[in-house]
Image (cartoon, rainbow, N blue to C red):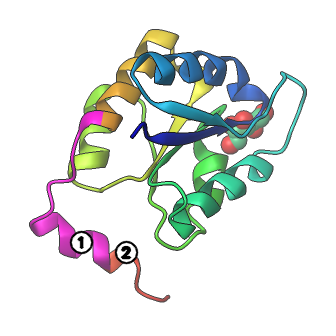
Amino acid sequence: MTERIPIASDHAGFELKEQLVRALRALGYEPDDLGTHSAASTDYPDYAHPLAEQVESGRAKRGVLLCGTGLGMSYAANRHKGVRAAVVWSPEVAGFARSHNDANVLVLPARFLSEGDAVAILKTWLETPFEGGRHQARVQKIEREA
Ligand code: RB5
């Protein structure tokens, strides 16, 4: 069955999100575009929370967020239990975000990436498995109550 992947951005990530929606389709996934749907100014938490709720509840296995720096989206998404939202700026970091950190939300700094770089990051993140082993216990420790 085709995997549905929720994807969302604010205005700063809008253009790149549109490109990644097309890239997801071309890679054989079913993108679920949660907005924003224009370049008009918006607030990133309004998009981060609905997407992270889907991952938190298990309705989606993983998702993709974009804003200017990636930071605001990651702050909001990481408030959700079980969400590991990673700001990623290169395919190599994307690989480690998966293999070591089991990142289930990919966050892209849209103002600092070309379309080609973003697609390469997306593809690596989608295709790299979590290594488990010594990394499993570390990832579990993230979830302790503060
Ligand atoms: C919007 O101007 C910008 O602040 C936002 O996209 C993001 O970078 C916040 O972290």
Instruction: Name the kind of residue labelled 2 in the image.
Output: Ile
Helix, strand or loop for disc 1:
helix
Asked if residue 130 lies in the magenta stretch, the reply is yes
Q: Position of residue 108 (x, y in %)?
A: 53, 34
Count of all numbered marks drawn on residues in the image? 2
Q: Which residue is mark 2?
A: 142
Q: Which residue is mark 1?
A: 138
Q: Position of residue 138 (x, y in %)?
A: 24, 72
Name the residue located 69 percent from the left edge and 17 percent from the top edge.
15
Residue 90 visible within the image = no
In the rendered structure, which segment of residues is drawn in magenta? 127-140
Residue 30 visible within the image = yes
Name the residue located 15 percent from the left edge and 62 percent from the top edge.
132
Q: Where does ligand 1 appear, by image quarter?
A: top right
Name the residue located 54 percent from the left edge and 67 percent from the top edge.
56
Helix, strand or loop for disc 2:
helix
Name the residue located 71 percent from the left edge and 56 percent from the top edge.
50
Q: Is residue 58 left or right of residue 79?
A: left
Instruction: Name the kind of residue labelled 1 in the image.
Output: Arg
